[in-house]
Amino acid sequence: MKATHASARQLGLVSCSDCHLLSRMKKTLAHEAAYCSRCGGELQQRKPNSIMRTWALVIAAMVFYIPANLLPMTITSALGSVSADTIMSGVIYFIHSGSWEIALVIFTASVFVPFLKFTILIYLLLSVQFKSIKRPKDRTRFYRFTEAVGRWSMLDIYVVTILVALVKLGFLADIEAGPAAIYFAAVVVTTMIAAESFDPRLIWDVVEDKS
């Protein structure tokens, strides 16, 4: 695939990461930084150490993902009996109770979406590192998807928070957040930061360099 127009990098232009003003990158000494003329933010052609930071965050999120699914998300006490539910046991409960719509939403937001984000981010990282020029537009769309859906993965945490706030009946019934809630929140936040750390312009740099 060949580039048909000169890119901003080829023209010496850079977009400010703070105010998004497109500025011409003035030549400076190696140890000196260039700054935006409008907001004063530091100008950088690409996010520094984007690949390394994204890999570190993705690996950390995958580590958090294991206890988030294995440990209890909620601990319920009712009339002296105590039960603990993981994300999947909660999904199974809603399926058996006939509320398959709720089960589908929880499974999608809490299990499938984080796993899909891992897959997409790893695919993007490997495609850049192996200098792939295939389907750059599709890969850019994948990246935008990971940015857009990140916040919706917190749905399970919102449900747990609401339940904990509402069900406080003393010795009759009580719901508390389990240890999985902390790990799951860590998964969501870490994957959101990982998506933000990845620089999608690297996808097009490879295409430009090979054109």
Image (spheres, rainbow, N blue to C red):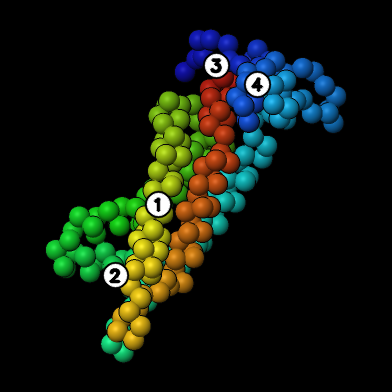
Q: Tag 3's secondary structure?
A: loop
Q: Tag 1's secondary structure?
A: helix
Question: Which residue type does callout 1 highlight?
Answer: Ser
Left or right: where does residue 164 sit relative to residue 40? left
> Of callouts 3 and 1, which one flags the residue occurring earlier in the amino acid sequence?
1
> Of callouts 2 and 4, which one flags the residue occurring earlier in the amino acid sequence?
4
Question: Which residue type does callout 3 highlight?
Answer: Ser
Identify whether 28 is placed above or below 54.
Answer: above
Identify whether 121 is placed above or below 115.
Answer: above
Residue to which mark 3 is pinned: 211
> Of callouts 3 and 4, which one flags the residue occurring earlier in the amino acid sequence?
4
What is the x, y in percent for residue 80?
Answer: 31, 89
Q: CA distance from mark 2 to mark 4?
A: 50 Å
Residue to which mark 2 is pinned: 89
Query: Does residue 70 appear in this view?
Result: no
Question: Which residue type does callout 4 highlight?
Answer: Val
Q: CA distance from mark 3 to mark 1?
A: 38 Å
What is the x, y in percent for residue 174?
Answer: 35, 78
Q: Tag 2's secondary structure?
A: helix
Residue to which mark 1 is pinned: 153
